Image (cartoon, rainbow, N blue to C red):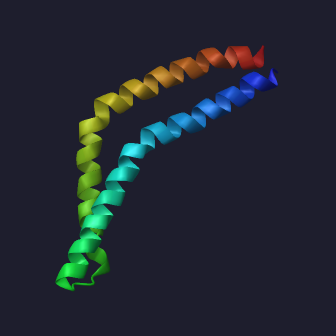
Amino acid sequence: MNAEAAIDLLKQVVLFALYVTSPFIVLMLLIGLLTSLAQSVTSIQEQTLTFGPKILGLALLLIVLAPWLLRALTEFASSCITRMAIVAG
């Protein structure tokens, strides 16, 4: 097994995971910030108020980004499968 190829494959997997999840993390951060701001302005300190908008935003972003996610995941999976032969060889 080629150690450099295995390390490179692991690095690519971690970077791809960050690449795919970053839009969702940023959206959840923005929604949390906006709902927290709205709660502090209106003095409504209900913990469950942040859950609804986050779930709704996540569902909408998932619908919008579904084609991109599927394309990116299939391309990455095929590249990983071709790189596995290099790692095993």
Whole-percent x and y of residue 26? 37, 51
Which of the image's four quarters has the N terminus? top right
Q: Is residue 83 left or right of residue 88?
A: left
User: In the figure, 74 relative to 86: above or below?
Assistant: below
Whole-percent x and y of residue 55? 28, 58
Whole-percent x and y of residue 30? 31, 58
Q: Which residue is drawn at the image coordinates 50% and 41% (left, top)?
A: 18
Tally of numbered tags: 0
Q: Which residue is drawn at the image coordinates 27% and 82% (left, top)?
A: 46
Which quadrant of the structure image shows residue 45? bottom left
Which of the image's four quarters has the C terminus? top right
User: In the figure, 16 relative to 62: above or below?
Assistant: above
Q: Residue furthest left?
A: 42
Q: Nearer the viewer, residue 34 or 5?
A: 34
Q: Is residue 89 left or right of residue 66?
A: right
Q: Is residue 16 left or right of residue 68?
A: right
Whole-percent x and y of residue 4? 77, 24
Q: Which residue is drawn at the image coordinates 66% and 27% (left, top)?
A: 9
User: In the figure, 13 relative to 78: above or below?
Assistant: below
Which quadrant of the structure image shows residue 73? top left
Q: Which residue is drawn at the image coordinates 20% and 80% (left, top)?
A: 41
